[in-house]
Amino acid sequence: MKEADILDQTQSVWSSFYEKIFVWINEFIDSLPNLILAIIVFILFIIISKYAGKLFNKILARSSTQASIRVISVKVLKAVIGLIGFFIALGILNLNTVLTSVLGAAGVVGLAVGLALQGTLNNTFSGVIISFLPKIQINDWIETNDFAGKVIDINLRSVVLQTADNNHVMIPNSKIVDSAFKNFSSDPRGRVTVSCGVGYESDLDEVQQITTDAIEAIFKQKFNEEIEFFYTGFGNSSINYIIRFWTKVENQKDIYTAQHQAILAIKRAYNKHDINIPFPIRTLDFGKNKFRSEVLDIRHQSDEN
């Protein structure tokens, strides 16, 4: 190939390159107003989402909505407003094909991420369910998954409990949704049970009356509440019973406190009326039978002599 031909081809390539550059520059200049407008619109929607989130949070706070619901609702609102601004910006740039590609790619990426993060997404959706579930709220005392404590946080991953020993336990949201839980704070009043036994020589009618009076003196029962007393069986050394009464119960400590006060009241009443609370007695045999047999053998030998 001659040098002249090579030179012509080189010039042709550079000429095409320059033409492309000039076309791109002209297109950029032509689309610059739209680009600036799209950027301004997107930034404007970001600012709107920020202030809309604050306003929405204040509205929810006035309606006494729990903190977890407010946080999730505000985040969803901000995300929706931001996405609307992004799509409007793409529309201003006349990038409809890009928008279609973005949505298609988002679908593929979302499917891949969903398969890879099944557990995390399960906890996230469970967190949304728990946040809008009125049965669990911040500061409630609940018992679930072999843990008991006060709910101090509900987020998109877990429910955080503060246990009685001041430790924090994070339970995945999916575990809460899929398992049974007990909420001590759902009602300020609860029923407490105390078990005991009295001697076989006791007057059972008198025991029932004395025990009921002792409990009623310190635990006032409200409307539709009553103290219940039941004998439950004949034990090895006592006749056993349970007594149930209503009191303020919002956490496990309240139950322990009520049982403590009830036991003190019952014991004082039994001491006053000489009612026996029997307990099993075990007799230990330290080889007494063997010792007796040896003594009898010695006596027998003495008699023979």
Image: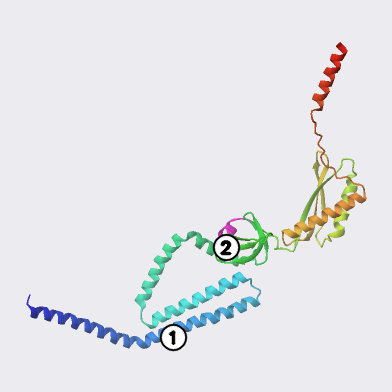
Residue 107 has which mark? none
Where is residue 221, by image quadrant? bottom right
Residue drawn at the location 90% of the way across and 48% of the way down: 206
Q: Amino acid at mark 2?
A: Ser
Instruction: Work out which residue is located at the far left of the displayed protein and give it.
Output: 2
What percent of the width, then of the height, locates residue 192? Answer: 77, 55
Instruction: Work out which residue is located at the far top of the displayed protein and give it.
Output: 305
Residue density around tag 1, few if under 14, some if 14–19, many if 20 or more, within 10 Å: some
Where is residue 279, by image quadrant? top right
Would residue 209 be seen by someone viewing this image from the given angle? Answer: no
In front: label 2 or label 1: 2
Check the picture and name the quadrant holding the N terminus. bottom left
The one of 210 and 21 positioned closer to us in this rendering: 21
Secondary element type, mark 1:
helix
Is residue 175 within the magenta segment? Answer: yes
Where is residue 58, by image quadrant? bottom right
Would residue 230 be seen by someone viewing this image from the given angle? Answer: yes
> Where is mark 1, residue-wise?
40
Secondary element type, mark 2:
strand
What percent of the width, then of the height, locates residue 61? Answer: 64, 76
Vertically, is 284 above or below 251? above
Residue drawn at the location 90% of the way across and 44% of the way down: 203
What percent of the width, then of the height, locates residue 231? Answer: 82, 46
- Report the span colored magenta: 172-181
> Where is mark 2, residue-wise?
158
By secondary structure, the bulk of the magenta-drawn segment is best described as: helix
